[in-house]
Image (cartoon, rainbow, N blue to C red):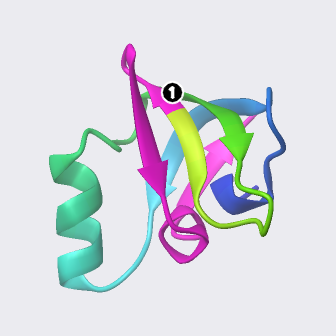
Protein backbone atom coordinates (compact mmCIF):
# COMPACT_ATOMS: atom_id res chain seq x y z
CA UNK A 1 0.00 0.00 0.00
CA UNK A 2 1.25 3.49 -0.77
CA UNK A 3 1.37 6.17 1.91
CA UNK A 4 -0.65 8.46 -0.37
CA UNK A 5 -3.55 5.94 -0.17
CA UNK A 6 -3.76 6.02 3.64
CA UNK A 7 -6.51 7.96 5.38
CA UNK A 8 -6.09 9.95 8.60
CA UNK A 9 -5.36 7.60 11.47
CA UNK A 10 -3.98 4.90 9.19
CA UNK A 11 -0.35 4.03 8.69
CA UNK A 12 2.13 1.28 9.25
CA UNK A 13 5.77 0.44 8.77
CA UNK A 14 7.69 1.79 5.79
CA UNK A 15 8.80 -1.12 3.61
CA UNK A 16 10.27 0.69 0.60
CA UNK A 17 10.99 4.16 -0.79
CA UNK A 18 10.78 4.53 -4.60
CA UNK A 19 11.68 7.33 -6.96
CA UNK A 20 14.46 9.23 -8.66
CA UNK A 21 17.68 10.18 -6.88
CA UNK A 22 16.75 13.67 -5.62
CA UNK A 23 13.30 12.63 -4.40
CA UNK A 24 14.58 9.59 -2.54
CA UNK A 25 17.50 11.56 -1.11
CA UNK A 26 15.14 14.25 0.21
CA UNK A 27 12.82 11.70 1.82
CA UNK A 28 15.73 9.87 3.45
CA UNK A 29 17.13 13.15 4.82
CA UNK A 30 13.75 13.85 6.43
CA UNK A 31 13.77 10.47 8.18
CA UNK A 32 11.47 8.57 5.83
CA UNK A 33 13.43 5.32 5.98
CA UNK A 34 12.61 1.63 5.75
CA UNK A 35 11.45 0.18 9.06
CA UNK A 36 10.16 3.46 10.48
CA UNK A 37 6.61 3.64 11.84
CA UNK A 38 4.46 6.24 10.10
CA UNK A 39 0.88 7.46 10.57
CA UNK A 40 -1.20 9.89 8.51
CA UNK A 41 -2.43 12.62 10.86
CA UNK A 42 -4.48 14.73 8.47
CA UNK A 43 -5.00 15.45 4.80
CA UNK A 44 -5.62 18.92 3.37
CA UNK A 45 -9.14 19.55 1.97
CA UNK A 46 -7.97 19.22 -1.64
CA UNK A 47 -5.95 16.08 -0.78
CA UNK A 48 -2.53 17.71 -0.94
CA UNK A 49 -0.40 17.86 1.26
CA UNK A 50 -0.58 15.09 3.84
CA UNK A 51 0.60 15.58 7.39
CA UNK A 52 2.30 12.49 8.78
CA UNK A 53 3.79 11.53 12.12
CA UNK A 54 7.12 9.74 11.84
CA UNK A 55 9.80 9.16 14.47
CA UNK A 56 8.06 11.42 17.03
CA UNK A 57 7.73 14.47 14.76
CA UNK A 58 5.26 15.79 12.20
CA UNK A 59 6.07 16.21 8.53
CA UNK A 60 4.07 17.45 5.55
CA UNK A 61 4.51 15.67 2.24
CA UNK A 62 3.04 16.30 -1.17
CA UNK A 63 0.83 13.51 -2.44
CA UNK A 64 3.37 12.77 -5.21
CA UNK A 65 6.12 12.35 -2.60
CA UNK A 66 3.91 10.16 -0.40
CA UNK A 67 3.14 7.99 -3.44
CA UNK A 68 6.83 6.97 -3.49
CA UNK A 69 6.57 5.45 0.01
CA UNK A 70 5.25 1.90 0.47
CA UNK A 71 3.87 0.96 3.88
CA UNK A 72 2.71 -2.30 5.41
CA UNK A 73 -0.23 -1.90 7.81
In the image, what residue occupies the spot 43% across and 72% down? Answer: 18
In the rendered image, the residue lying farthest to the top is 56
Q: Mark 1, residues whose alpha carbon is within 10 Å: few (<14), some, or many (≥20)?
A: some
Please, is residue 70 above or below residue 41 in the view? below
Q: Residue furthest bottom?
A: 20
**In the foreground, 25 or 44:** 44
Residue depicted at x 78% and y 69%: 46
Tag count: 1
| Magenta span of residues | 53-73
Query: Which residue matches tag 1?
Result: 53
Q: Nearer the viewer, residue 12 or 54?
A: 54
Nearer-the-camera pick, 20 or 4: 4
The verdict on residue 68 being magenta is yes
Q: Residue 55: image x %, image y %?
A: 36, 20
Residue 65 belongs to magenta span? yes
Q: Secondary structure at mark 1?
A: strand
Residue drawn 65% across and 53% down? 3
Occupied quadrant, residue 33: top left
User: x, y percentage for residue 24?
Assistant: 28, 68
**Which percent across, then down, holds residue 26?**
21, 63
Say above or below: 39 vs 25.
Answer: above
The C terminus, quarter of image: top right
| Left or right: where 53 falls relative to 72 | left
Quadrant placement of the N terminus: bottom right
Front-most of 19 and 5? 5
Give x and y (percent) for residue 59: 41, 40
Residue 34 is left or right of residue 45, and the answer is left
When asked about the image quadrant of residue 8, the answer is top right
Q: Quadrant of residue 19?
A: bottom left
Amino acid sequence: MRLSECRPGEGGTITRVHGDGPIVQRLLEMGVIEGAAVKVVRVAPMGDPLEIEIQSYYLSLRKAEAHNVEVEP
